[in-house]
């Protein structure tokens, strides 16, 4: 049976092989994507969709006056 240190050494070697294979696969995928973009003339919008317009905060009132007029009343429960 392999010792702990031997297994760690094997793991490090395997991790290095995995990283090398991943880098090679990533380069191949990028080359394939670039070839398809060049062949079909894809635009960033085609690939990623159109950018959405930025929206302001939802559900927040901009001023205290707007809050008072929107509620049409006083919520002070202790005033007479």
Image (cartoon, rainbow, N blue to C red):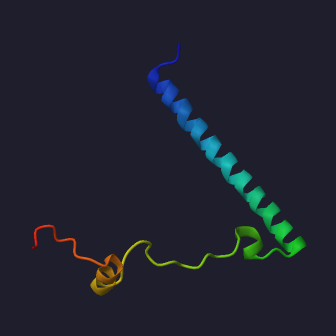
Which residue is rendered at x = 53% and y = 13% of the image?
A: 1
Please state if 64 lies on the left or on the right of 76 as rendered. right
Residue projecting furthest to the right: 39
Q: Residue at x 45, y 26 (%)?
A: 5
Q: How many marks?
A: 0
Q: Is residue 7 above or below residue 25?
A: above
Please state the horizontal and vertical placement of residue 31, each as a whole percent of the image. Answer: 79, 63
Picture quadrant where residue 61 is located: bottom left
**Where does the image place residue 41, in percent across and percent down from the top left?**
85, 76
Along the viewing direction, whichever of 33 and 3 lies nearer the viewer: 33
Residue at 82%, 71% in the rendered image: 37
Foreground of the two, 59 or 46: 59
Q: Residue furthest front?
A: 80
Q: Going by the picture, which residue comes out furthest to the top?
A: 1
**Vertical placement of residue 53 versus 10, above or below:** below
Front-most of residues 29 and 7:
29
Q: Quadrant of residue 29?
A: bottom right
Looking at the picture, does residue 58 appear above or below residue 1? below
Q: Quadrant of the C terminus?
A: bottom left
List x then y, in percent, for residue 21. 69, 46
Q: Is residue 10 left or right of residue 48?
A: left
**Snapshot quadrant of residue 16:** top right
């Amino acid at each position: 049976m392999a010792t702990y240190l031997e297994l760690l050494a094997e793991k490090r070697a395997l991790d290095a092989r995995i990283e090398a294979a991943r880098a090679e696969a990533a380069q191949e995928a990028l080359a394939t994507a670039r070839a398809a973009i060049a062949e079909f003339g894809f635009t960033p919008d085609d690939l990623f969709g159109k950018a959405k317009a930025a929206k302001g905060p939802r559900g927040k009132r901009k001023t205290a006056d707007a809050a008072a007029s929107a509620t049409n009343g006083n919520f002070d429960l202790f005033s007479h």
